[in-house]
Image (cartoon, grey):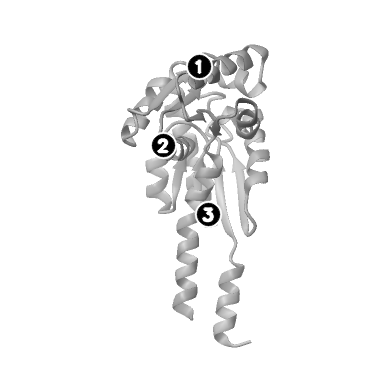
Amino acid sequence: MSHHQTQVAETEKETLRILIINPNTNSTVTQSIRELVLRITPPGVITEVTSPAHGPYAIENEQDKAAATQHVLALVEKRKAEGFSGYIMACFDDIAIAEIRQLTQAPVISLAEAGIRYAAASGGLFTVITTFVEAVPTIEALSATYGLSERCRVVATGLGVADTAAQTEHAEARLHDAIQTAIRLDAQAIVLGSGAFAGRAKALQTRYRITVIDGFEEALGYVLKPTQVINQTQLLNQS
């Protein structure tokens, strides 16, 4: 094998590693995310789902968010030397996003940005369904930051992350009502606005016959694309 062929082979063998962080310490949510990510990870990519060892069980107010941000940043600081190609924040907020970008210089995105931007590509109205009511203003502010607030409607089931992840009868009834209302209001897509909904998009899409997005596949595609472009450029430069 020539020196050129060896370089190309080594580049092709490079494995992309993505770290997905659930910023709360709810192990049920983390496991649901882990199971979903395992199903959607493409060949040649290693994904790891983790959460801070300490911090809020659910992030439902500014105090929780501040605490979670500190613990997430400590986690990233500890592990950034491992050379992850990108990071996904598995929540519907901007928790630590800007800080992680500065720390790592790698692609970083939240479920919120990935999901909302993808839903907007439908060209029509879309509804974000989140969990607790206090999250609504935060998501509305994020959609405004992305320039999409006019087409984005944000509603809450009124129940927390724990009930949502456990799919309690009450939580499921609230979710059903929210989806039905969105359809009546001519939404072209539904965005599941919490990591607690992980793994449910396809089943809900089949049931309600409307595009349902949870942000995971979209976020994974985003963090992988820059790395794939870099690798392709390296191969071209070596040819």
Q: Position of residue 25 (x, y in %)?
A: 59, 29
Q: How many marks?
A: 3
Q: Are marks 2 and 1 in contact (CB under 8 Å)?
A: no
Q: Is residue 141 left or right of residue 132?
A: left
For label 1, the residue is: 181
Residue beneath the point at 34% across and 33% down: 148
Instruction: Report crowding for label 1: few under 14, some 14 to 19, many 20 or more residues within 10 A (C-alpha).
Output: few
Residue beneath the point at 50% across and 33% down: 91
Instruction: Tell me the distance, in whole angstroms, between the alpha carbons under discs 3 and 1.
Output: 41 Å
For label 3, the residue is: 84
Q: Position of residue 36 (x, y in %)?
A: 65, 39
Instruction: Report crowding for label 2: few under 14, some 14 to 19, many 20 or more residues within 10 A (C-alpha).
Output: some
| Residue 87 seen by the camera | yes
Which is nearer the N-term, disc 2 or disc 1? 2
**Residue type at mark 2?**
Ala
For label 2, the residue is: 120
Q: Quadrant of residue 109?
A: top left
**Residue type at mark 1?**
Thr
Eyeballing the image, is 37 above or below 24? below
Which is nearer the N-term, disc 3 or disc 1? 3
Which is nearer the N-term, disc 2 or disc 3? 3
Eyeballing the image, is 200 above or below 233? above
Local secondary structure at mark 1: helix
The label on residue 189 is: none
Depth check: give the residue in front, 11 or 219: 219
**Residue type at mark 3?**
Phe
Residue beneath the point at 47% across and 72% down: 234
Eyeballing the image, is 56 above or below 172? below
